[in-house]
Image: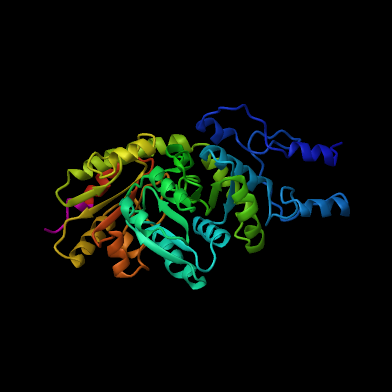
Amino acid sequence: MTTWDDESRRIARAALPEGLRRETLAVRTALAPSQHGENSEALFLTSAYVQPDAATMARRFADSEDFTYSRTSNPTVRSLEARLAAMEGTQAAIATSSGMSAILLLGMGLLKSGDHVICSRSVFGSTITLFAKEFAKFGVRTTFVSQTDLSEWRAALDTTTRLMFAETPTNPLTDVCDIRALADFAHEAGALLVVDNSLCSPALQRPAEHGADIVVHSGTKYLDGQGRVMAGALAGSSRLMKEVFGPVMRAAGMVLSPFNAWVVLKGMETLDLRMRAQSANALQVAQWLEQQPEVARVYFPALASHPQHALAMRQQSGLGGALLSFDLRAASPEVARTKAFHVIDRTRVLSIATNLGDTKSIITHPATTSHGRLTEDQRRAAGIGQGLVRLAVGLEHPLDVIDDLERGLSTLAP
């Protein structure tokens, strides 16, 4: 018969040898199996955990490492956290209900009235809104700077700067920042560098290796990889995850559900294979788009024409990722929008949606979707024009994706 001491031992992290590569960590890192010896990580759908006696319950509620209530800890969620930390090369991770809730947890854990944040103006639209509007309600000041101009980041630093926040590559223009340079700026000023790694994932890029203090993920994207669930996470030092963000999580409850954690765990097992295949597909599509007369510019880090191509190849394992965007030639914003809608509406294979990271290729119009709630000035500052089309390339044959785009591009009115 299993005793409670036995239970405690087998719920420890599974012992793995040192030096395993990312592909192996993505498959093997998790809590140890139950007494049943399941090979696929178990899904623990429970809100509470029965305790053997009142004294043990008191001790476990005092120790956040023990399982007491699924708002504070759950074995499936903890397996996901362990796997992500292992892949990112950080000490720990904490999972959240979405990518934006991860950034909310970041702000609630680290910022207070009077603090200053420096943020790239090219980040995801909701991230801009969260910093510029929601955090501002509580006295947090944010300065938005060029993603790629290091002098703007340095000039924005002051004695109250607490965080520097970058997303690399950015969504949707794929601007790439120099993580190491920004980390040096932040640390010289006593601030922390936070990098959103959702578009590359740890399969291509590990920001902590370049000096980032905290890595942000929308697990909804490539970690899941099949467009099934919402998820988010922060990864970094054990102190930050457990002592700073853990108490906020327990109080505020932006917790990831066990089912969603289990789905993302399964998705991460194929992350490396998917990212490499989708990156190769995206490069073929991007190269074709560059040759099209109706396309003014293609944004994709693996293209030699990309302004940060060399930097991207160093930081991103020599791959461009799976997201690209392109601008259509047009005489005015109104004409540009009409053309963009035409290209999108003529597709028959691609999904017209706002997500990315799926095995199914997704096409969207950023100016009216992901960045639709920004002001026109904010969109202009971020480089989001009405003729911009974003494409998240999936696992279809790249020639079928190209044929689908050609249906619209070849029938555009002059």
Q: Residue at x 84, y 37 (%)?
A: 2
Residue 204 % position (x, y): 42, 38
Q: Which residues are magenta?
A: 408-414
Q: Main secondary structure of the magenta part?
A: loop
> Is residue 413 shown in magenta?
yes
**Quick check: 227 left or right of 108?**
left
Of residue 330 and residue 53, the one placed in the foreground of this image is 53
Residue 174 % position (x, y): 33, 49
Q: Residue at x 53, y 53 (%)?
A: 231
Q: Is residue 307 visible?
A: yes
Q: Is residue 399 visible?
A: no
Residue 280 % position (x, y): 33, 36
The C terminus lies in which quarter of the figure? bottom left
Q: Residue at x 32, y 49 (%)?
A: 175
Q: Residue at x 29, y 38 (%)?
A: 310
Say which quarter of the image contains residue 72.
bottom right
> Is residue 110 shown in magenta?
no
Which coloring applies here? Answer: rainbow
The N terminus lies in which quarter of the figure? top right
